[in-house]
């Protein structure tokens, strides 16, 4: 994760504004409709709606395929069905229906037919055919329970024929729908201007009559119905809420109702239609099909209602991308009566929400790696979609596609911005210094946002010096190629261990390694990690000698010196060329301790300060108190044996004998010291050294001012 600076935040905001403005602009207005479609589908799939159709205030009487296939309608043109329609409507009215709306239009009558039939036109011979139908329309209309439908158009209006208009006293309302640019119906008009006056649309008229009120225009310009302010982002429209996906509307086959009239079952009509708004319309597979917000989820042509006289068809209803037009009006009427129309956010709020989402994604893309940013976009989109679906359950439509797509665009633009501008310096740093600096140093420079420059700071560190013993003589026996191969293998293995324990390799000097722990990355346990790395390096060299063919026959050994203390670390050098390195007396002492190993025959030597900072992590033995070249103060030095509790029996035995001998040595009891050291002299070079020195001093005692400090000559 990278740190995001002020410039990056500014870029993220500009990108978010640009992406938000693009995806909420008028050319992409279709995305708002797509959001409604997706929300409708997701709500249907994830939440569902199991409302009982019996509670629906709206029912549909369907002139369906069953009607066309059932006598007496089978083979008869629909113009001849009017008398039967009148009888069924009369029974529905007697059953207690609040209002009946026509979603079918009979623009002409069979009485108007001019087709010759014998010596006179057919219409002349059929005079009076629609009389009973027109009487039924007059009676139901006069009771305030009938509204005929019409299609308003400047070019091709579709209206009931004149006799019907007179029968219902022009009680006709428009069936026109609001179709978006993609030919999908998501909203319904509330009113139309007829002769310069606003006239309610069919759905509004039916809902108003069912509620016993009239629509009014509030001071805000919104339409109110019985105290309900109808929401709508598009003026004078209602956004449809297909909560039940059409399955919540009971649908009666006109054929079965006509048979029920013949049967004389008035109770059935009362049970089915009492208190209901009734819509009469065609429900066919090939006529008056509409694409709506249910197009992605699949809508239903209602739910088959109870039957009265005819057996139910065997074929079950299936979800389709389109629905019969009558169910669009049924949904609008139900939305109005139940106050359940969808509330959409206006353009300002949609834009703000889209920009905010894009800004969050852009900031994430500024902080995370590209793969992480993509995952963040997916996670944020999923969380936002879940919130949007939750809001849609309560009929609030939050924009969905606009924020998600704007977020994706912001993601792409922010990644592009980082690649071209923001991360250019970082790539330069990593490319330029990858082979010279530790990853931690590069990360520090990248996080600071600054190019490397001269400067340093005082840090408490542990220095690590190592050198191969007698390597010059070994190198003389090897070809240049063999020498390079061996050194690369050795230095790679040691470096991996050092860096694996948090160390930083400062430099290689021939076969020597200079490293530090505690910088550049801060490490409170730098002493412990340095000692642990030294032990692992010693084990690794033994493993290479035993198993790596490059090392075979050479028997390489190395010496390691460790010292902890304050040191200056940072970019040190000239103004044109510098390196991240370390300087101080701490460094010099570590170098001297590495060389001191050869006097004692040890592989690892650490100062008392390093030993003290490791606590009880390791088992140690004190080797001596020494005075190294260039330093007047004596230093107590120690050899790490192993992790505490992991030392071998032999190591424990040697350390105990050595400690006894060292105590006698410092007490000037040289004979006893010689005996103690002699016990392990054959297997321990340090004990052999002290045994020899103790015997010499036992034979020739030192002066009274003698101190048990070994002054080492040379490095």
Image: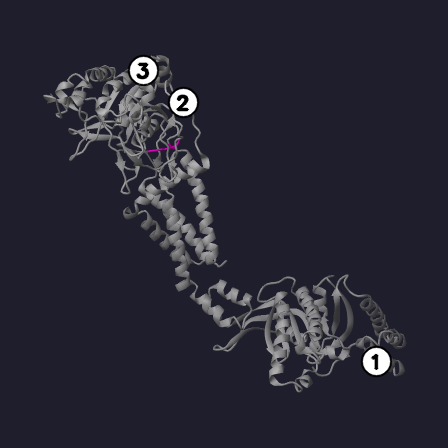
Relative to residue 62, is residue 627 depicted above or below?
below
Residue 539 found in image quarter: bottom right
* Residue found at the very far left of the displayed protein: 119
> Quick one: label 2, few (<14), some, or many (20+) residues within 10 Å?
some
Give the secondary structure at mark 3: helix
Label of residue 693 in the image: 1
Q: Secondary structure at mark 1?
A: helix
Q: Is residue 243 magenta?
A: yes
Helix, strand or loop at mark 2: helix
Q: Which residues are magenta?
A: 240-245
Residue 492 bears which disc, if any? none
Q: x%, y% of residue 176? A: 24, 32
The answer to which of marks 2 and 3 sits earlier in the sequence is 2
Q: Mark 2 = which residue?
A: 54
Instruction: Kindly report the distance in space between the C-alpha atoms of the residues bearing marks 1 and 2.
Output: 110 Å
Q: Earlier in the sequence, mark 1 or mark 3?
A: 3
Which residue is rendered at x = 70% and y = 75% of the image? 545
Q: Main secondary structure of the magenta part?
A: loop
The numbered mark, 1 or 2, whose residue comes first in the sequence reads: 2
**Direction from residue 696 to residue 538 in the image, left or right:** left
Q: Nearer the viewer, residue 374 or 578?
A: 374
Depth check, front residue: 225 or 138:
138
Closer to the observer: label 1 or label 2?
Answer: 2
Residue farthest bottom in this picture: 476
Residue 528 visible, this orientation: yes
Residue shown at 54% from the left, 73% from the top: 436
């Amino acid at each position: 994760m990278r740190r995001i600076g002020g410039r990056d935040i500014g870029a993220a905001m500009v990108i978010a504004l640009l992406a938000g403005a693009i995806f909420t602009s008028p050319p992409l207005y279709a995305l708002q409709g797509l959001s409604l479609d997706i929300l409708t589908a997701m709500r249907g799939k994830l939440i569902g709606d199991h409302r009982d159709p019996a509670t629906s205030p709206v029912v549909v009487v369907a002139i369906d395929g069953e009607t066309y296939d059932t006598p007496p309608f089978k083979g008869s043109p629909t113009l001849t069905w009017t008398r039967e329609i009148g009888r069924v409507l009369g029974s529905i009215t007697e059953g207690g229906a609040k209002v009946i709306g026509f979603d079918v239009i009979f623009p002409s009558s069979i009485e108007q037919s001019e087709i010759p039939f014998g010596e006179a036109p057919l219409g002349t011979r059929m005079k009076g055919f629609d009389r009973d139908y027109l009487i039924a329309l007059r009676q139901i209309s006069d009771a305030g329970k009938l509204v005929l439908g019409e299609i308003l158009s400047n070019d091709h209006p579709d209206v009931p024929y004149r006799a019907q208009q007179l029968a219902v006293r022009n009680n006709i309302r428009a069936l026109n729908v609001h179709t978006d640019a993609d030919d999908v119906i998501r909203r319904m008009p509330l009113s139309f201007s007829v002769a310069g006056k606003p006239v309610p649309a069919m759905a509004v008229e039916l809902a108003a009559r069912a509620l016993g009120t009239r629509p009014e225009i509030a001071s805000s310009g919104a339409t109110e119905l019985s105290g309900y302010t109808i929401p709508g982002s598009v003026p004078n429209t209602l956004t449809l809420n297909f909560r039940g996906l059409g399955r919540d509307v009971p649908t009666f086959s006109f054929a079965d109702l006509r048979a029920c009239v013949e049967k004389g079952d008035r109770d059935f009509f009362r049970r089915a239609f009492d208190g209901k708004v009734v819509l009469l319309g065609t429900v066919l597979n090939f006529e008056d099909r509409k694409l709506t917000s249910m197009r992605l989820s699949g809508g239903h042509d209602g739910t088959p209602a109870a039957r009265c006289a005819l057996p139910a068809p065997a074929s079950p209803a299936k979800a389709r991308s389109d629905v019969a037009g009558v169910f669009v009006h049924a949904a609008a009427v139900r939305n109005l009566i139940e106050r359940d129309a969808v509330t959409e956010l206006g353009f300002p709020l949609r834009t703000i929400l889209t920009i905010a989402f894009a800004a969050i994604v852009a900031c994430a893309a500024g902080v995370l790696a590209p793969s992480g940013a993509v995952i963040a976009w997916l996670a944020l989109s999923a969380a936002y979609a879940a919130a949007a679906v939750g809001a849609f359950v309560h009929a609030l439509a939050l924009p969905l596609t606009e924020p998600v797509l704007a977020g994706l665009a912001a993601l792409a633009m922010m990644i592009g911005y980082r690649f071209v501008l923001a991360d250019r310096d970082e790539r330069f740093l990593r490319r330029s210094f990858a082979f010279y600096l530790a990853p931690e140093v590069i990360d520090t420079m990248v996080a600071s946002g600054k190019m490397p420059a001269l400067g340093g700071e005082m840090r408490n560190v542990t220095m690590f010096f190592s050198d191969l013993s007698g390597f010059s003589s070994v190198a003389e026996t090897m070809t240049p190629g063999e020498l390079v191969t061996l050194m690369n293998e050795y230095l790679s293995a040691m470096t991996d261990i050092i860096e694996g324990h948090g160390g930083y390799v400062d430099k290689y000097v021939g076969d020597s390694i200079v490293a530090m722990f505690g910088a550049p990355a801060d490490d409170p346990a730098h002493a412990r990690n340095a000692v642990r790395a030294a032990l692992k390096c010693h084990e690794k060299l033994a493993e290479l000698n035993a198993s790596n063919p490059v090392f075979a026959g050479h028997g390489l050994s190395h010496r390691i010196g460790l010292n902890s203390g304050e040191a200056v670390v940072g970019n040190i050098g000239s103004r044109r060329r510098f390196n991240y390195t370390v300087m101080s007396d701490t460094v010099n002492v570590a170098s001297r301790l590495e060389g001191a190993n050869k006097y004692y025959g040890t592989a690892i030597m650490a100062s008392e300060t390093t030993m003290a900072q490791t606590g009880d992590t390791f088992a140690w033995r004190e080797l001596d108190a020494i005075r190294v070249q260039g330093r007047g103060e004596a230093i107590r030095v120690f050899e790490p044996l192993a992790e505490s509790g992991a030392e071998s029996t032999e190591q424990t035995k040697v350390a105990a004998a050595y400690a006894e001998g060292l105590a006698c040595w410092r007490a000037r009891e040289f004979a006893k010291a010689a005996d103690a050291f002699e016990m392990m002299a054959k297997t321990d070079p340090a004990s052999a050294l002290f045994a020899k020195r103790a015997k010499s001093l036992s034979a020739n005692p030192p002066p009274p001012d003698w101190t048990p400090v070994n002054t080492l000559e040379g490095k």
